[in-house]
Image (cartoon, rainbow, N blue to C red):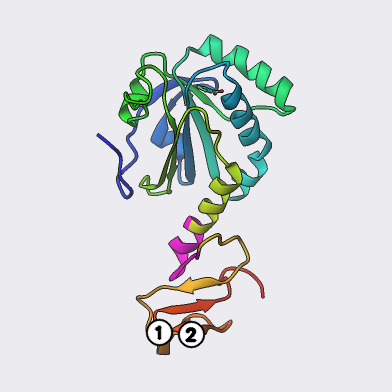
């Protein structure tokens, strides 16, 4: 069954390139990024895993642990990691789940039979510290994901989890935010002392509340 936003991310125990993990225990009290790869030793996946490794510091800064899944075995993953490190000039330092029996990809509905009966689509799940799913993305096999977009969404998810704001189209860290419709305009100054602008009664903006002016 498809996983919907707000659902508890299904838990599992699996072999990974960093040993056996229980997913929920491994996540601990931080955020998680679970993403699937159609197969080992494929070109687009090689660049995606390399990009994730290159951005490790950015994920760590946001308290996000990345974990990939691919439906090949551990030996295959280990050999492939050498290639990724070599060709992408990085070091893969997050686990890759060995899911040869497709247990995890079935749990997360990552095979879309009308796209391919054997390979997974490129799924992304962002999971909050309470283990609820906050974001799902599905890309086709031939289109590599944009990892700056994934970081951007995580910034929005973490901001909107803590403040009564939403983020507008193309928002990036540091830009003005939208005051949540649930906040009455007369209550904005107390909640958002940095200032606000009323563009329409339903469209009020404020500087990003969690950063220095
Ligand atoms: C790739 O990861 O490069 C890939 C996988 C399946 C189809 C097309 C590309």
In this orientation, which residue lies closer to the viewer: 166 or 146?
Answer: 146
Q: Is residue 152 left or right of residue 97?
A: right
Give the side of residue 93 with respect to residue 201, left or right: right
User: Which residue shows up at 49% across the image and 65% down it?
Assistant: 167
The residue located at (37%, 26%) in the rendering is 115
Q: Residue at x 63, y 66 (%)?
A: 174
In the picture, the quarter occupied by the C terminus is: bottom right
- Above or below for 88 versus 172: above
Q: Is residue 79 above or below residue 10?
A: above
| Mark 1 nearby-residue class (10 Å; few <14, some 14–19, many ≥20) | few
Residue lying at the far bottom in this picture: please name it. 186
Please provide percent x and percent y for residue 45: 57, 26
Residues marked 2 and 1 touching at CB (< 8 Å): yes
Number of numbered discs on residues: 2
Q: Is residue 199 visible?
A: yes
Q: Residues within 10 Å of mark 2 (few under 14, many from 20)?
A: few
Q: Which mark is residue 198?
A: 2
Give the image quarter of residue 185: bottom left
Label 2 and label 1: CA atoms lie apart by 6 Å
User: In the figure, 96 relative to 179: above or below?
Assistant: above
Front-most of 121 and 51?
A: 121
Q: Which residues are magenta?
A: 157-168
Magenta-span inclusion, residue 166:
yes
Tell me where residue 122 appears, x and y as whole percent: 46, 32
Describe the element under mark 2 as helix, strand or loop: strand
Element at label 1: loop
* Of 117 and 6, the residue lying toward us: 117
The answer to whether residue 93 is seen in the rendering is no
- Residue carrying label 1: 201
Q: Residue 41: percent from the left, percent from the top? A: 58, 15
Q: Residue at x 66, y 72 (%)?
A: 212
């Amino acid at each position: 069954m498809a996983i919907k936003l707000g659902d508890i991310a299904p838990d599992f125990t699996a072999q990974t390139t960093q040993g056996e993990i229980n997913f929920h225990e491994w996540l601990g009290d931080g955020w998680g990024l679970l993403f699937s790869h159609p197969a080992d030793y494929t070109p687009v996946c090689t660049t995606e895993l390399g990009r994730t490794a290159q951005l490790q510091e950015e994920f760590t800064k946001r308290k996000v642990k990345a974990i990939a899944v691919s439906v090949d075995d551990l030996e295959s993953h280990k050999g492939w990691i050498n290639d990724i490190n070599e060709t992408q000039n990085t070091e893969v330092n997050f686990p890759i789940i060995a899911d040869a029996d497709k247990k995890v990809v079935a749990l997360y509905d990552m095979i879309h039979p009308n796209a391919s009966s054997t390979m997974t689509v490129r799924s992304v799940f962002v999971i909050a510290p309470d283990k609820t799913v906050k974001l799902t993305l599905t890309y086709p096999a031939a289109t590599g994901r944009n990892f700056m977009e994934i970081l951007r969404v995580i910034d929005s998810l973490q901001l909107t989890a803590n403040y009564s704001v939403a983020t507008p189209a193309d928002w990036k860290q540091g830009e003005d935010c939208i005051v949540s419709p649930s906040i009455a305009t007369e209550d904005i100054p107390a909640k958002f002392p940095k200032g606000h602008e009323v563009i329409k009664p339903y469209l009020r903006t404020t500087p990003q509340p969690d950063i220095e002016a």
